[in-house]
Amino acid sequence: MSNATVPNAMPRDLILERFLPYRLSYTSNLVSDAVADTYKALFGLTIPEWRLVALIAEREGITQQEIGSLSRMDKVTVSRAAIALADRGLIERKPNPVDRRSQLLALSEAGTRLYEAVAPKALEMERAVFGRFSDAELETFTVMLRRIDSAVLEADPGV
Amino acid sequence: MSNATVPNAMPRDLILERFLPYRLSYTSNLVSDAVADTYKALFGLTIPEWRLVALIAEREGITQQEIGSLSRMDKVTVSRAAIALADRGLIERKPNPVDRRSQLLALSEAGTRLYEAVAPKALEMERAVFGRFSDAELETFTVMLRRIDSAVLEADPGV
DNA sequence: CCATTATAGTTGCAATTGATACTATATCAG
DNA sequence: CTGATATAGTATCAATTGCAACTATAATGG
C-alpha cells in the first residue's frame, strides 16, 4: 500500500471511517435529509420553519432571540423563518410590552392546526428510524448526545 | 399555558427538545463547526477537502466516484475539493487505464506531509470531545449510528 | 460495428446560509 | 437627564451547496 514514507506513527487505514465527528455528521445528514424532504413535501415547511412552529407551540410568547439560543439557530435564520411563517399567516407577532425591540411570537389558528398535523407526522418519522431501538438504548443515546454537547461547549464556549 | 384549543391529543411541551432528528442535528452541527474551524485555521482545509485527503491516504488510487459513494458527498463537492487540492499540489490525478472518464487520485509528497500533520490533530480533537467516554460507550454509540444509517437507508433508499 | 443508454467528472445557475452592517430600542455610568 | 455601549431584529452581500445540463467515455443490445 505504498506507506514506505510513513513510519507507522499513525494508523494509516480507515481513520475517516472510524472518526466520530465524521460518523456523526454522516448519520445526521442522512436523517436530516430524509426528514427535510417529508416536511417540505407534506407541509411546505423548511426545517428552520418547523422548528419555530414547534418551539412556539411549546412556549407561547417566545421571542426570536430565545428561539435562537435554545436551538442554536442563527438569528438571521430565525428572522427569515419567522417572516415566512408570519407571511403565511401561521404565526402572529405581537409587541413585547417590556422590550419594544423584540416581539412575542404565537401560533395563529392556522398555525395551531398545522402544528397538530405536523407533530404526529414528525413522531411517526422518528419511529420509522428509531423505532427499532429499545427505550434503554434511546435513553443511552440521547444522554451521549447531551454529554457530547457539554464537552464541545466546555472546550470551546465560542462555538 | 393556553392550550385550551388543544384537546391534549398530542403532548404539547418539549417535542422538539426530545426529538431525535433534532438532537442529532444539533450535536452534529456543534461538533462539525468546532472541527471545521480548526481545520481551516491550522491547515486551510475545508471539511470536504480534509475528507478527501484522509480517504486518498487510506486508499491510494481511489476515484472521485468511489469517494462520493463512500462518504455520501455530492459528486460536485468531491470534484471541487479535488480541484482545489490538485491546485494546491496536495494530490495528483493520474489517468485511469481501465476507464478514461475517471482519474486515480493519490497524495503528493506535500499532501502526504499534510496528512501526517492533520491526522494527529484530528485525533486530538476527537479525544478532546470524546475522550471522556469509555471504550464501551463509544462502541455502543458508533453501533447506534450505524444502525440508524441502516434504518434510514432501508426506509428510503432514494436519500 | 452502430445506436442507445449509462456513467465520471465538470460547469453554470439558483437556492441556502451566515457574516456584517444597520436601525431601533434599551441599559448603564456619571 | 445625557452620552456611551449593548441588544433584538432586519437587510445586504458574499460564500457554500447542490441540482441540472453538458462533455467525454463506456457498456449493451441488435
Image: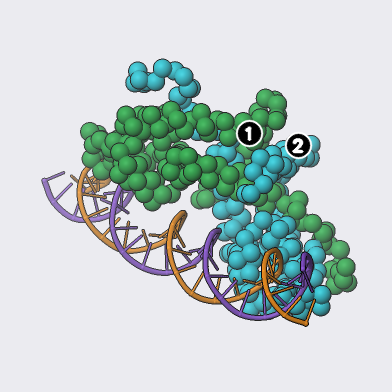
Chain colours: A green, B cyan, C orange, D purple
Residue A120 relative to residue B156: left or right: left
Instruction: Tell me which residue sits at (76%, 51%) in the image.
Output: A18
Of residues B76 and C2, the one drawn nearer to the viewer in this rendering: C2
Which quadrant would residue B150 be assigned to in this image? top right
In the image, which disc is placed on residue A97?
Answer: none
Query: What amino acid is labelled 2 in the image?
Result: Thr
Please state, as top left, top right, bottom left or bottom right, where the N terminus of chain A lies in the image: bottom right
Instruction: Tell me which residue sits at (51%, 50%) in the image.
Output: A158
Q: How many marks?
A: 2
**Crowding at label 2, few (<14), some or many (≥20) Cα neighbours within 10 Å?**
some
Assess whether mark 1 and mark 2 are in contact (beta carbons under 8 angstroms): no
Question: Which chain is mark 2 on?
Answer: B
**Crowding at label 1, few (<14), some or many (≥20) Cα neighbours within 10 Å?**
few
Instruction: Tell me which residue sits at (63%, 69%) in the image.
Output: B79
- On the same chain, marks 2 and 1? The answer is no
Give the x, y percent position of residue A146.
60, 36
Residue A95 relative to residue B17: left or right: left
Of residues A110 and A99, the one drawn nearer to the viewer in this rendering: A110
Give the x, y percent position of residue A86.
31, 41
- Can residue A114 be seen in this snapshot? yes
Residue labelled with disc 1: A128
Residue D6 relative to residue D2: left or right: right
Query: What amino acid is labelled 1 in the image?
Result: Ala
In the image, which disc is placed on residue B140?
Answer: 2
Of residues A91 and A157, the one drawn nearer to the viewer in this rendering: A91
Instruction: Tell me which residue sits at (39%, 38%) in the image.
Output: A66
- Can residue B108 be seen in this snapshot? no
